Image (cartoon, grey):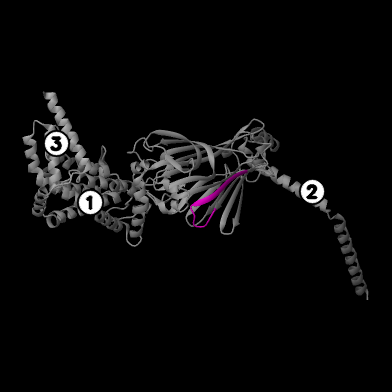
Amino acid sequence: MEEKKLDIKSIVGFVLISGLLVWMMYTNTPTPEEVKAQEEKAKTEKIEAEVNKTATVVTTNPTDSLSVANAQKELGSFAYSATLPSAKDEFTEVKNDVLALKISNKGGFITEATILGFEKFNKDSKQLVQLIKDNNANFDLTLNTKDNRVLHTTDLFFEPKVSKEGENQVVTMQLKAGPNQFLEYRYVLKPGEYMLDFAIRSQGLEDVVNTSKPLDLEWQMKTYRNEKSISYENRYTEVSFEYENGKDDYLNAQKKLSDATAEDVTWIAYKQHLFTTILLTNEAFKTASFTSENLVANEDIDTVYTKNFVTKLPLEFKNGKLDYEMNWYYGPAKYQILNKYDRNLDEVMSLGWGIFGWINKFVFIPVFGFISGFMPYGIAIVFFTILVRLIMSPITYKSYLSQAKMKIIRPEIQEINEKYKDNAMKRQQETMALYSKAGVNPMAGCIPAVLQIPILYSLIYFFPSVFDLRQKSFLWADDLSSYDNIYQLPFKIPFYGDHVSLFPILASLAIFFYMKMTTGDQQMAAPPQEGMPDMTKMMKIMLYISPLMMLFFFNNYASGMSLYYFISNLITIGIMFVIKNYIVDNDKLHAKIQENKTKPKKEGKFQKKMREMMEQAEAQQKMNKK
């Protein structure tokens, strides 16, 4: 009975103690106002802790109060940015299938841009092509504050934020002067695209930054070497830009230092031969200045950088705010990719001016793209060459036919020259009369050669610009976009190089045999002219000079181009052999010329005018002698 009483007492005591505890907890629960105050206190303590960690940005060895004071002294209103958790050297990384980017908190700009799927030339290890890395590029805005400070965004910390808009990755970087006062860079990376959306805007900075004049934007970049041949890559590494509603221009890549200015600029491209970085804007920059510095002092020495590019632009305020919609492009300098954006970006590529660029854009690029779509690139070059030579074969035929006709009437021209050796005017009249009677046009041999010049010149621009040849092998060539190397010389030959390329040797031999095959006919066709240089001797000299020039010229050029000229000259030799032995019958041609002489010729207006002028000149000459 006694045990039972003790149990009841224990239970009662436990209930009383529990009730007391519940009452104490209830009476000590903080009000909503007290909770908010505690949260604010915790946030303040966290910020102060971060200031202690990041105070080295503005001073060394600081105390909490000294850190804030120094930040205020150095940065003014932008001291707020130094107190945020993002005020440290960290990066935001985003990538899609073709491009990987790293954006720094410090400066808010892209500090690493890697092109996925493409390797740079490297003797020791395989590395992906990186247009930006290791501080080779800067993107800086100069801020002139209302309290007379000059700050650079590359020295200040931006607050990053990553989000998604559908499949697009969005990174915003905000340089803050307060919770709702900031300068913002906004990057949008889309799936499978080399082109990013990029925007610069400001909010609430009217009382912080002097908005009465534009902000100075400076974009600087040292271009990395990515290809095997330093000289070849550097030749095509240049600044180009679009201005004044569609005009385009570039800086001379061969000069040690070159510069230019332009108005109403809509894009600027830093091209590294087969890759390019481009800044585009929807609203034209009012003015821009460009500088290009060649960093390759000696091509014999291995180098990291090829050029240093600097562009300076003004960003204008509208109603006290910045608002620029722009784009960044990091990727291949490939015509098909650049052209699809419909922003005139194909002008970034060196395809030649005038008719040469037109031939490349609308003939060679589509045709070669079609052929290379279903066969290896080396074989595609061979088929492309065959196609070009077949199209040009009628011109070759016309040229040879003209030479054959001139060869047949050469003895008669020599007779005229001998008969009228003391009367140049009469000699010229008789020679032209013979041409007219025989139905021979002395210019017919020159016209086909002139017609071939646009084709040949376009090809010189075409092959260095074909991105798809990059690192594609064929036979002994490991990269059709660069030189083929069959032997490394222990020394360097001036204008030739320190290696031996086989395709240029084969191309030079082919052009030698072609010229040897045709030089004799040209010499027989071209009668000697009084007062003119001996063409026979000149042709003999050119027989050896031309192949030698080709050998030296192409030794450091793309092996794809040398392959083209080798195959082209072989085909031309074959075409000339067929024309000479199976198409043009010299006996029939001779009979035709003799027949033409017997037919009356109707004198054209131009021929009549020329005859009358010569007769007048001859009459005047006779009168002068009297």
Question: Quarter-wise, where is residue 303 in the image?
Answer: top left
Identify the element where label 3 is drawn: helix
Q: Answer yes or no: do the residues labelled 1 and 3 have beta carbons within 8 Å? A: no
Q: CA distance from mark 1 to mark 3?
A: 28 Å
N-term mark: 2 or 1:
2
Instruction: Say which quadrant the N terminus sits in.
Output: bottom right
Instruction: Say which quadrant the C terminus sits in.
Output: top left
Q: Nearer the viewer, residue 519 or 66?
A: 519
N-term mark: 2 or 3:
2
Instruction: Say which residue appears at 37% left-offset and 54% top-offset.
Output: 468
Q: Which mark is residue 395?
A: 1
Q: Residue furthest bottom?
A: 1
Question: Left of 208 or right of it: where is 104?
Answer: left
Q: Which mark is residue 428?
A: 3
Q: Nearer the viewer, residue 17 or 485?
A: 485
In this rendering, the answer to whether 523 lies above or below 257 is below
N-term mark: 1 or 3:
1
Give the extent of the magenta segment.
189-201
**Residue type pointed to by label 3:** Gln
Q: Nearer the viewer, residue 298 or 437?
A: 437
Q: Answer yes or no: do the residues labelled 2 and 3 have beta carbons within 8 Å? A: no
- Of badges 1 and 3, the one in the foreground is 3
Tell whether position 129 is magenta: no
Instruction: Say which residue appears at 10% left-offset and 45% top-offset.
Output: 409
Mark 2 lies on residue: 37
Q: Where does residue 244 sit, x and y in percent of width and height? A: 49, 40
| Mark count | 3
